[in-house]
Image (cartoon, rainbow, N blue to C red):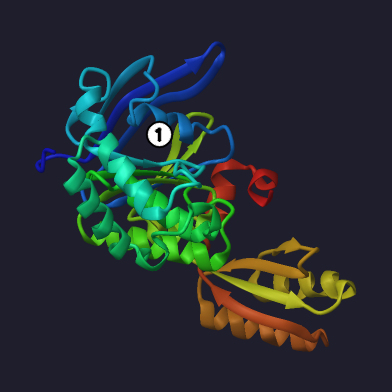
């Protein structure tokens, strides 16, 4: 792999299916040793991008290079330098964990001795040694996902693609996968991650690309994208639905701006500039109105709010 350039780079990448434009002139640069998260609603083009970058699909036009190699002209070289963890487990559930990794090693043309040694290294690295002999069918979802990661790394690729790797996992299992990804990046692996979990991107990514209708609509660090929505927010959580109109009036009087409301959650949210003065004013107006609230908190904008603003797909994100 070239060390003097980006690990992943695309220019004017385009892919269509008849009248459907899956990717529309996508430009992307991912520095080596970093995590880039690609966010977008269903059908935005995330998986199409991954399939092109992993040589599973040919673009109609534009260029793409991975690990310094062209995905069209040097597909074999690209495949030798990447790992891919898809949305569904790729391991054999009948085999044990160690057997799976040895099998993947042999498929990557490692010698029997090297495949066995590499399997043992990865089992230890991902904390799977104790269950290595058990059939994978008996493993938990999070443990299987760690085996998927291990299998993708059997040939020690410098670039790893994770296509929604924690879909369907419980919070503990998701956290285990996040820890594994952090360890990989610390060791120098470049990761491109597609996800619909905004917290996942916030926790893992150095940079984020928001894709909608095949186009990159925003790019930057998670903090930079959050800053596009302005400064702090004040959230007011109510006890009773009947208090909503009075609370809206009180918050508007305190801040000069009408808050957005979430009636189902009994929550009001308003952007503010001077967090201390605004918080004091909101508390004062709520007290004057005789309202008893569950909580009042100051917070920064979330990546969820950025995503919803940029894609306008609230129903899809909530699903």
Residue at 55% over, 82% down:
277
Residue 308 x/y as whole percent: 59, 49
Question: In the displayed structure, would residue 249 be above or below residue 209?
Answer: below
Between 67 and 136, the residue placed more toward the observer is 136
Residue 244 x/y as whole percent: 83, 71
Res 70 → quadrant: top left
Res 239 → quadrant: bottom right
Label 1 crowding class (10 Å Cα cut-off): few <14, some 14-19, many 20+? many
- The answer, for residue 178, to whether it is visible in the render is yes
Question: In the displayed structure, would residue 25 be above or below residue 226?
Answer: above
Residue at 55% over, 66% down:
171
Horizontally, residue 26 falls left or right of residue 287, namely left
Residue at 29% over, 26% down:
11
Residue 247 x/y as whole percent: 78, 74
Horizontally, residue 178 falls left or right of residue 31, namely right
Mark 1 secondary-structure assignment:
helix
The residue under label 1 is: 50
Residue 134 x/y as whole percent: 46, 59
- Which image quarter is the N terminus in? top left
Between 220 and 249, the residue placed more toward the observer is 220
Horizontally, residue 227 falls left or right of residue 5, namely right
Horizontally, residue 128 falls left or right of residue 141, namely left
Question: In the displayed structure, would residue 173 be above or below residue 189?
Answer: below
Residue lying furthest top: 18
- The answer, for residue 220, to whether it is visible in the render is no
Residue lying furthest right: 242
């Amino acid at each position: 792999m070239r060390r003097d350039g980006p690990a992943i780079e695309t220019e004017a990448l385009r892919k269509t299916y008849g009248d459907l434009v899956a990717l529309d002139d996508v430009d992307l640069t991912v520095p080596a040793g970093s995590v880039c998260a690609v966010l977008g609603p269903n059908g935005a083009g995330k998986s199409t991008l991954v399939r092109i970058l992993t040589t599973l699909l040919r673009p109609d036009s534009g260029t793409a290079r991975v690990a310094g190699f062209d995905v069209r002209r040097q597909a074999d070289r690209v495949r030798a330098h990447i790992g891919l963890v898809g949305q569904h487990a790729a391991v054999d559930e009948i085999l044990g964990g160690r057997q799976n990794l040895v099998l993947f090693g042999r498929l990557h043309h490692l010698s029997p001795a090297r495949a066995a040694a590499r399997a043992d290294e990865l089992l230890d690295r991902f904390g799977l040694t104790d269950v290595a002999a058990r059939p994978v069918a008996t493993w938990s979802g999070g443990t299987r996902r760690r085996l998927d990661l291990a299998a993708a790394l059997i040939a020690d690729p410098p670039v790893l693609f994770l296509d929604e790797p924690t879909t369907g996992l419980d919070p503990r299992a998701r956290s285990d996968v996040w820890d594994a990804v952090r360890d990989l990046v610390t060791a120098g692996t470049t990761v491109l991650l597609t996800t619909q979990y905004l917290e996942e991107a916030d926790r893992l990514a150095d940079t984020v690309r928001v894709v909608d209708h095949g186009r990159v609509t925003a790019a930057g660090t998670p903090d930079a994208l959050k800053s596009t929505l302005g400064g702090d927010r004040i959230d007011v959580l109510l006890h009773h639905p009947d208090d909503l109109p009075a609370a809206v009036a009180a918050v508007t009087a305190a801040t000069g701006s009408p808050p957005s409301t979430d009636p189902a959650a009994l929550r009001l949210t308003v952007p503010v500039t001077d967090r201390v003065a605004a918080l004091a004013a909101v508390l004062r107006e709520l007290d004057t109105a005789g309202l008893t609230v569950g909580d009042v908190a100051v917070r920064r904008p979330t990546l969820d709010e950025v995503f919803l603003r940029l894609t306008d797909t609230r129903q899809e994100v909530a699903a």
